[in-house]
Amino acid sequence: MTEGSVPVARRHGHIRWPGAAIGLFLSGAAAAGAQSLPPLTEVAGDPARGEALLRDMGRASCLICHEISQLDEKDMGEIGPLLDGVAERYDAGELRARVADARTLNPDTMMPPYYSLDGLAGVARAYRGQTIYSAQEVEDVVAFLLTLTDEAAQ
Ligand code: HEC
């Protein structure tokens, strides 16, 4: 291996990041697993669009597994932790890392990787080669999660 080339261990990380994210990701915590990720796009996320995505049960909704009291949906799951006040526990980068690919933090997680194709072999043909969310949709969901403060949960 020549000096300056990408070490093999890093190329075999859990996530294959498209486009511009690759450089940022590899320069950061790739080997240890990403605890935090920089923004995936240059356009700030829109919390209202993020909320709409979360409520869309046809898009592998977070609410299958997580409850968020203020959304007042009838049928929410309890497999994952309650997301009330989650903005007090994690910053934007930490939330983004979890939504993009929670396996970087817990390889055995049940949480689907919303922005990774790694290990998604065998999905229905219509969905092959696509991440669950686009980069902008990840930003929208993160922007919504950041509104989930303790105050918002009152
Ligand atoms: C199939 C179930 C499932 C789905 C769907 C799911 N999650 Fe999770 N999530 C989990 C589980 C289980 C955990 C607990 C940590 C772990 O196992 O990785 C978790 C952890 C989290 C955490 C950390 C919470 C904490 O208090 O530590 C956040 C934030 C989160 N999920 C956000 C989301 C968002 C946003 C979505 C939708 C885009 C989503 N999850 C979809 C199961 C799920």
Image (cartoon, helix red, strand yellow):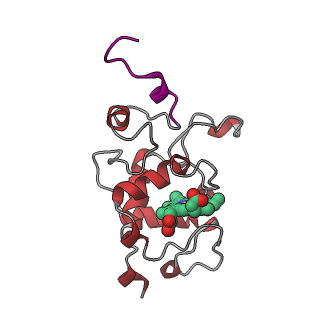
* 112 relative to 125 in the view: left or right: left
Q: Quadrant of residue 121?
A: top right
Determine the quadrant in which ligand 1 lies. bottom right
For residue 103, say whether it is visible.
yes
Q: Please tell me which residue is depicted at 71% across the width and 40% down the height of the picture.
A: 124
For residue 61, say whether it is visible.
no
Q: Which residues are magenta?
A: 1-13
* 109 relative to 3 in the view: left or right: right
Question: Residue 54: percent from the left, percent from the top?
Answer: 52, 64
On whether residue 36 falls in the magenta region, the answer is no
Question: Residue 115: percent from the left, percent from the top?
Answer: 50, 45
Q: Please tell me which residue is depicted at 58% across the width and 36% down the height of the picture.
A: 118
Q: Please tell me which residue is depicted at 54% across the width and 42% down the height of the picture.
A: 131
- The residue closer to the viewer here, 4 or 119, is 4
Q: Is residue 62 depicted above or below 126 in this figure?
A: below
Q: Residue furthest bottom?
A: 154
Q: Residue furthest top?
A: 2
* 94 relative to 15 in the view: left or right: left
Q: Is residue 33 depicted above or below 146 in this figure?
A: above
Question: Residue 49: percent from the left, percent from the top?
Answer: 42, 62
User: Which quarter of the rendered picture does the C terminus lie within?
Assistant: bottom left
User: Which quarter of the rendered picture does the N terminus lie within?
Assistant: top left
